Amino acid sequence: METWEFTVTGAVENELTYSWREFNDLPRETQLQDFHCVTGWSRFDNEFTGVTFPTIVERAGVRDDAEHVVFGSLDGYTTNLPLDECLREEVLFVLELDGQPLPSEHGGPLRVVTPHKYAYKGAKWVTSVTFLTEPKRGYWELRGYSNTANPWAEERYSSL
Ligand SMILES: Nc1nc2c(c(=O)[nH]1)N[C@H]1C(S)=C(S)[C@@H](COP(=O)(O)O)O[C@H]1N2
Ligand SMILES: [Mo]
């Protein structure tokens, strides 16, 4: 945790870097959320505590031409979403699951959850958020999984 750093870069007014302690000082909230994996399983009523995506955006100030977001993780994983799909209270940077620090196998110390999208849109071990002026695909989006990933429409695969 001494070397952990979270960065907010790209098409923003203020690029930000948070240490672990600084990130933990951000306002947090607790939400009950469902979690849908593209392979067919779901886990319901997860109690997640964390910092909302809009909270980060308020502090960074996105530029007018920002349209897209790429999340980056310590394992090299990336995933992408349009900015408007991120500007939702339920897009959460999760610090705790069921009131306990998020276990590392589930992406601790910090992961993203996206209940309105399949779970591959939620980067585990997340350490960067980059705002872009044009779309860019992440790890699974480049390998045949749906770029849009709406579970209610069962958007599982892309027709590349
Ligand atoms: N950094 C990172 N995040 C990731 C992945 C990954 O391989 N690396 N896999 C994704 C996929 S496909 C799913 S289904 C969920 C799984 O989350 P869980 O391990 O908490 O069930 O994490 C997502 N986030
Ligand atoms: Mo998955």
Image (cartoon, helix red, strand yellow):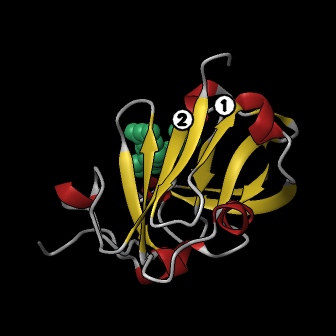
User: In the image, which disc is placed on residue 109?
Assistant: 1
Estimate the x, y position of residue 114 in percent, counting from the top left.
58, 63
> Disc 2 on helix, strand or loop?
loop
Residue pictured at 52% horizontal, 53% vertical: 122
Q: Is residue 24 left or right of residue 53?
A: right
Estimate the x, y position of residue 126 in percent, counting from the top left.
53, 41
Kind of residue at disc 1: Pro
Residue at mark 2? 125
Distance between mark 2 and mark 1 Cα atoms: 6 Å
> Disc 1 on helix, strand or loop?
loop
Mark 1 residue crowding within 10 angstroms, few (<14) / some (14–19) / many (20+): many
Nearer the observer, 117 or 62: 62
Comes first in the chain, label 2 or label 1: 1
Q: Tell me the quarter of the picture where residue 103 sits.
A: top right
Q: Tell me the quarter of the picture where residue 14 sits.
A: bottom right
Residue pictured at 38% horizontal, 55% vertical: 79
